[in-house]
Image (cartoon, rainbow, N blue to C red):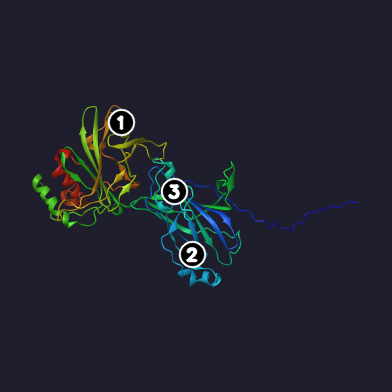
Amino acid sequence: MSACCIRDPKWKDNSTTVKFLPRQHGDLTISYDVIQAYSNNYWAQITMDNHHPLSRLDNWNLTWEWMRGEFIYSTKGAYTLLKDSTDCVYGEAGNYYGDLDFSKVANCQKRPISWTSPEREKDSELGNIPYCCKNGTLLPPTMDPSRSKAVFQIQVFKLPPDLNRTALYPPQKWKISGVLNPDYKCGAPIRVSPTEFPDQSGLMAESLALASWQVVCNMTKDKPKHARCCVSFSAYYNDSVVPCKALLVPFTNRSAKAKAWARIKHLPLPNRAPCGDNCGVSVNWHLYSDYKSGWTARITLFNWEDYTFGDWFAAIQMKKSISAGYENVYSFNGTKMNDTYWPGLGNLVFMQGLPGLNYLMPEVDGKNPWDPRIPGKQQSVISFKKAKTPGIDIRAGDGFPAKVFFNGEEGSLPDAIPASDGYISFPVSQVGLLSWALVVAVVHVLFNDLNEWS
């Protein structure tokens, strides 16, 4: 006896297949991995990877928006800046979780703000996670690959109708920011193949996340008037300092120093006082010398903030192939980079503080109560050889950088360079003798260390 079986043409497969998108590249990527799941809550691990060689975040704040009523019950490796259970108690969470002690809930905000603290790195409750608790600092991989990653975990409670261990939805509208760092624009989370982790048993095995999403963030370029880092140009053959074009707010308490300096140099003052750049950090590029076989410049960093920049870095991108003649940075640790590091980063010199000199100190009070405040300063001479760059004209502009970066933030450059005839190529009344935000630093050096600015 035999039977013939024919497939029912009306039968449909009810199984669902999850489609994964390929992982994308970006300046900063965030991985949202569900590592444990229960019917009404789950644990997620959030991993931030900094990829760009000039990207950096200090005291980072990471935010997102819950779209389905979720709330954070507990955290490890980081914590939320506000511990408030009000939205839970008086919202849908309070109605559903009637017997839950909300005083222990980490955060009930729709847009929580997460941060990390170095004091809890070995804490059994809030720490003990690899790559956690780095004091909110993400360095570029060119400085320290071990500090270009940050990891923390959150326990997320869900609400109906998502009471199923497979009902997993990532938060949306991600945003990350830091102190005087580049601005980032983050895309929407995309579902990717489950992330692999080293097995907790210590064996040579890999464990997979239950579900993974990736968020890609890329740096955006500020408009000049919004720049937070200002660059000025000066040269040995010109007494003036050409300020950046980010001119915003006047600083009347610095007028006396600028007027005194102008009288000494017998230079006219504009009828209308120029405005300061109002930037937290300013950079002065001073063309120091130009001779037959080479040339030198001096780069000076001024910190006008009350914040100490630890493990700072700066970078200059020269025009044409000028950096091919790079020789040395004498007071900093300098490295010449090319397009093999990152597309578009050719002709770039990367600089960071030497051990023990990697702190750019904050602004401090002057010697006398009536003196203006003095910015923190770091300074070094950088030298170039002309053998590999024949035909360059240092005074005509080849000796001035095309781009300047501080901690990843691209600085606003001047519209002109110091002219060889002792004047600036545009009218003094347009920008003034000095950028008011640089007056204290420049005048202080002029009065107290004239030889240094010769």
Please tell me how crowded label 2 is: few (under 14), some (14-19), or many (20+) other residues with Cα within 10 Å. some
Residue 248 image point, x, y percent: 24, 56
According to the picture, the residue beneath numbered tag 1 turns out to be 325
Q: Of label 2 and label 1, which has the lower sequence position?
A: 2
Q: Closer to the observer: label 2 or label 3? A: 2
Question: Between residues 289 and 139, which one lies in front from this camera angle?
Answer: 139
The span from disc 2 to disc 1 (Cα, nearest Å) is: 59 Å
Q: Name the residue under label 3.
A: 28
Which kind of residue does numbered mark 2 sit on?
Val
Q: Where does the C terminus fall, quadrant-wise? A: top left
Q: Nearer the viewer, mark 1 or mark 3?
A: 3
Q: Nearer the viewer, residue 20 or 162?
A: 162
Q: Which amino acid does label 3 sit on?
A: Leu
Count of marks placed on residues: 3
Question: Do tag 1 and tag 3 residues touch (Cβ < 8 Å)?
Answer: no
Instruction: Please say whether residue 372 is visible from this viewpoint.
Output: yes
Q: Crowding near pointer 3: few (<14 within 10 Å), some, many (20+)? A: many
Labels 2 & 1 near each other (Cβ < 8 A) = no
Q: Looking at the image, tell me whether mark 2 or mark 3 is earlier in sequence order.
A: 3
Residue 454 shows in this picture: no
What whole-number distance in Å separates the C-alpha atoms at marks 1 and 3?
Answer: 32 Å
